[in-house]
Amino acid sequence: MHIHPQQREEALDGASAARNLVSLLTPLLTDDTGYSSGTSSPVQMSTRDCRGILSAIQALVPTLIPDSPIFAAFHDGQVHDPLGGGSYAFQDDLVGPVLQALLNDEALSNDDKRRAGNRSDETSTQNCPTTNHELNTQRPIPLPNRPIVIHAGVQPNNSPHVGTIVVFCYAFSLARGIRDRMQAAAVNVDDEPPFVSVEITFVDTAPVKGEGTEIGGIEYQRSYRDVPGALDTYMADYEEVLYLLSTWSGIRVTTAFQYNLFSSPIIPSILRYFVAHHDLLGRQLSPKHGKLALRAACPIPGCALAEKHGQLNIYNDTNHAQNKTASPAANDPTITFHCPHHGPHTISVSNPADVARLEANAPARSLIRSMSHLLDTKAHHVRITGADYAGMYQEMFLYRPLAAWSAATGLAAGRTPHILYAPLIVDWSGAKLSKTLYVREGGYNAMKLFGTDGLGSFAQLKSRFGSNGSEGLRRIWEEVQGWLGDPKKLFRPFSLEYLQRVIIEEKKWES
């Protein structure tokens, strides 16, 4: 058999590394060196000897699988939760400040001004139900009047991995915490606590892999909702996860799709603003293309192509040049989209069936959704999303456009969305655990070797636990509840190695 020179060199390196490790370990196997006299207890090694053994292990490990090298890393097993920023501000309680923010919203809303005036003393900061201690007093605690909906969203293009499951668990755990806090407060008041629920929105307008095309430098896509059977691949996994979390938490869950968002009666007024300010919004929400990424699939049966980035969209803001003799519908703003095969097709902002066809990329969708939540005076909306959407992303794509909208229209004055960020689940390098379709092919193959593959998807997690497929999910649920009970833990990432011990092995780390 012919052995390639490189393979021979790697084999020699492996043999050399193995011999080096054996030479360092051999003294530990002898009574006079490795163990104290008359006992079987190892003698404390020197730091230098220990470092030498660890270095030898690190040199050997990459040679074990030469075609796909792996690397050894070590840690002391101690977990630290240092304070700072959000972890400092909310180290004792998270639910109370959220409830206070909802009460403040009601005080700012026009339809609640009368109630706010009558109970202004109750909606002050010092009366906020921020701690369990306050709930045990006899003083009446104000409660929000409106139902509270905790939102999370997902692209259903894979079986949910542990990062997505953590977001779901956070949503249900927060909902339960709010419900329990309000129920405890209601013991001493006549008010009935408002209903708390979770809504999971499926981004069925995400592109289906292999269904897109590029023509003349313009990208086109087909969405999951427009490709028969595409949504069915993983929906059973999501349904099982949501059913179990709803059952364990006692919180009702509903599901929604993009159609539900764009079918809201609030959306047309928001779209009129988008049409009138599409140039500015395009620059704000899409630094790469400078265009507002609104889409609509081609309505010709069997086509359903939509231009991905909205580069060819035509916006007609007829409100700026109204024909006084025309009907109001004729003067309504329109957006014309382009199909590479069937040409232009137009939607009217005043036509509900047209508006329901709309799609939007993540920044535009988030802005539209946040505007609609701020304009809804019948319910409170709190969103849970991954921490990778915090920071500059939200400042650029959400809060600045919202401030400009509020200043231009006078709407939602003094209010901002309620968003909580779930801890990221990260790999050894600090990168977030991603869907396999977003990393290079085979990027997560080593997870099986490391024993963390059960965290890669709910399907794998169930397989890992055999007949009791829900056990892994239960462990994640209990871990996330612990984070909410000790809120400083919600402001840091967690590694796959941390979760491997906690979830897969059901052991605890030293704190």
Image (spheres, helix red, strand yellow):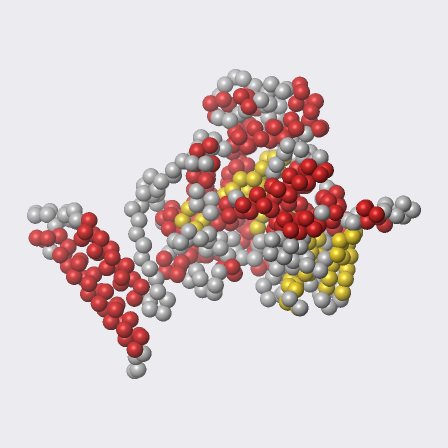
- On screen, residue 146 versus residue 511, left or right, reads right
Residue 372 lies in what quarter of the image?
top right
Residue 199 lies in what quarter of the image?
top right
Measuring from the top left, give residue 24's x and y in whole percent.
17, 58
Q: Is residue 254 visible from the viewing direction of this image?
A: no
- On screen, residue 56 versus residue 101, left or right, reads left
Residue under the image location 50 percent in, 45 percent down: 387
Measuring from the top left, give residue 264's x and y in whole percent.
72, 44
Q: Could you say which is closer to the camera, residue 231 or residue 94?
A: 94
Residue under the image location 47 percent in, 36 percent down: 86
Q: Is residue 91 visible from the viewing direction of this image?
A: yes
Q: Is residue 12 above or below residue 320?
A: below
Q: Is residue 511 above or below residue 343?
A: above
Q: Could you say which is closer to the camera, residue 417 or residue 406?
A: 406
Residue under the image location 39 percent in, 53 percent down: 428
- On screen, residue 124 versus residue 467, left or right, reads right
